[in-house]
Structures are given as C-alpha cells and as structure tokens.
C-alpha cells in the first residue's frame, strides 16, 4: 500500500514537472506565431517591387513590418476607392494622382490619414498592429522627413514581401463595400473623427 502511494506520488510529481515545462514553452511558441508569420489572402499576390512613380503620378507605400495579428488583414481605401489589403510582413505600392487624398484603414477599428502628394514623389505609411477586444486593431504611421523611420524604409522593404492586388478581386471588394465606406469618409472629413485624422505633407516625399 505504501509503495503504491509512493509510486502514485512520484508519477504525479513527474507529470507536474512535464506540464510546467510545456507551460514555459507555450508563450514562446505563441510569440513566435504572432511575431514571425507573414499574412496572406486571395486578394493580394507576391509581385515584383515597383521601381518608382511615373512622371505624372505619386506613389504611396503601405508597409506592415510586424507579424503580430497575421491572420487579420487591414483594408486600405483612398476615399471610396479600395486600394488593397495590408498583410503582416508585407508591403504594397499605390500609384495615384498628385494632390490631396484621404486614406482610410479598416480593422476592428477605423483610422484615417490625409496626404498631400507631389508629382513624381514616393511616400511611406506604416500600418501598425495593436491588440483589440476581439481581433487586431491598427494605426497609421506617416513616415516624416527627419524621423527615425525615414532612414529605415529601404531596409524594411528588403525584409518584407512585396504584394499587389488582383484587379478583379479588388474591384469586387470595392463594389461590395463602397456604400459602407461612405459613412466613414463623412465621419473623418466633416464629422467627429476629423480631429483624429493624421497628416502626410508634400515635403515628406522623396
């Protein structure tokens, strides 16, 4: 009887030690999954990086360096024009007319940035991830001349996947969501959200 109790006790202790080891490992596995994975979707495909803006256009890069929240892709809109999805550890380029644009980002939350773009220049906007109540939330970070990020953009681009939107899929998404987007354009343009809109000015092109 005593031997049985001792054996049971030893087995229990051994199991507890194994369980503790697994519990120590789990956070590291979770962190690796969250921080190390690239995103994917049926709307975006890997492509050859864009060389630069055409003479009569401006180019805006949307970069998402983090792998956190990789299962959630962020919608990027230029007012009511759907630009593409910002995926984890990826970036894409948006060619557009110079002048003012209202870029919207949709995740669990909604964010906006007003950009004034110059002909023949390239601009950079970071799409950063943070944890939300149920899924990933996002922030825009305009890359400003003289900031720490300004000199890091080329290195970031080398480490990320360059992707582009499938035009047919992009157009379908835009048609399905365009009406819903209108209320957010109004919210950030003339509504309560106007004070939350970030700025990206002409002088921040390169």
Image (cartoon, rainbow, N blue to C red):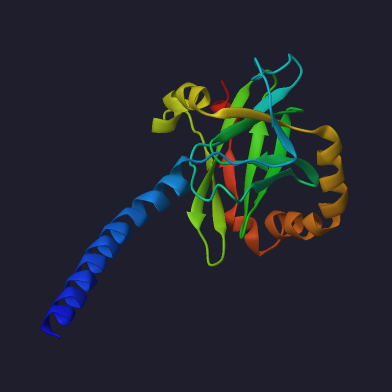
Q: Nearer the viewer, residue 33 or 92?
A: 33
Image coords of residue 71 (percent x, y): 59, 50
User: From the viewer's perspective, is 128 left or right of 7?
Assistant: right
Position of 160 relative to 114 (above/below): above
Q: Quadrant of the C terminus?
A: top right
- Percent position (x, y) of residue 56? 76, 17
Residue at horizontal 32 percent and vertical 53 percent from the top:
25
Between 2 and 80, the one nearer to me in the picture: 2
Residue 108 in view in this figure: yes
Instruction: State left or right for residue 8 relative to residue 126.
Output: left
Task: State whether residue 187 is above or below residue 31.
Answer: below
- In x, y percent, where is residue 31? 40, 50
Mark count: 0
Q: Can residue 147 be seen from the camera position used here?
A: no
Left or right of residue 143, residue 104 in this image:
right
Name the quadrant containing residue 183. bottom right
Task: Give the position of the N terminus as an image quadrant.
Answer: bottom left
Q: Position of residue 158 (x, y in %)?
A: 50, 22
Placement of 110 over or under 119, stated as above or below: below
Front one among 155 and 166: 166
Query: Can you name the residue that lies furthest to the bottom here?
Result: 1
């Amino acid at each position: 009887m005593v031997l049985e109790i001792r054996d049971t006790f030893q087995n229990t202790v051994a199991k507890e030690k194994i369980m503790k080891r697994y519990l120590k490992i789990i956070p590291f596995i979770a962190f690796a999954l969250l921080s190390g994975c690239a995103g994917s979707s049926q709307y975006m495909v890997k492509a050859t990086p864009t060389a630069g803006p055409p003479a009569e256009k401006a180019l805006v890069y949307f970069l998402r360096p983090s792998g956190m929240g990789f299962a959630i892709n962020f919608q990027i809109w230029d007012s009511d024009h759907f630009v593409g999805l910002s995926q984890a550890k990826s970036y894409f380029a948006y060619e557009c007319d110079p002048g003012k644009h209202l870029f919207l980002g949709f995740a669990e939350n909604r964010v906006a940035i007003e950009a004034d773009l110059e002909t023949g220049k390239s601009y950079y906007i970071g799409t950063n991830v943070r944890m939300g109540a149920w899924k990933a939330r996002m922030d825009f970070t305009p890359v400003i001349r003289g900031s720490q990020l300004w000199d890091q953009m080329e290195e970031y681009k080398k480490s990320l996947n360059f992707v582009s939107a499938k035009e047919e899929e992009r157009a379908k998404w835009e048609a399905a969501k365009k009406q819903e987007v209108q209320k957010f354009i109004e919210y950030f343009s003339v509504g309560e959200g106007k004070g939350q809109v970030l700025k990206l000015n002409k002088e921040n092109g390169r």
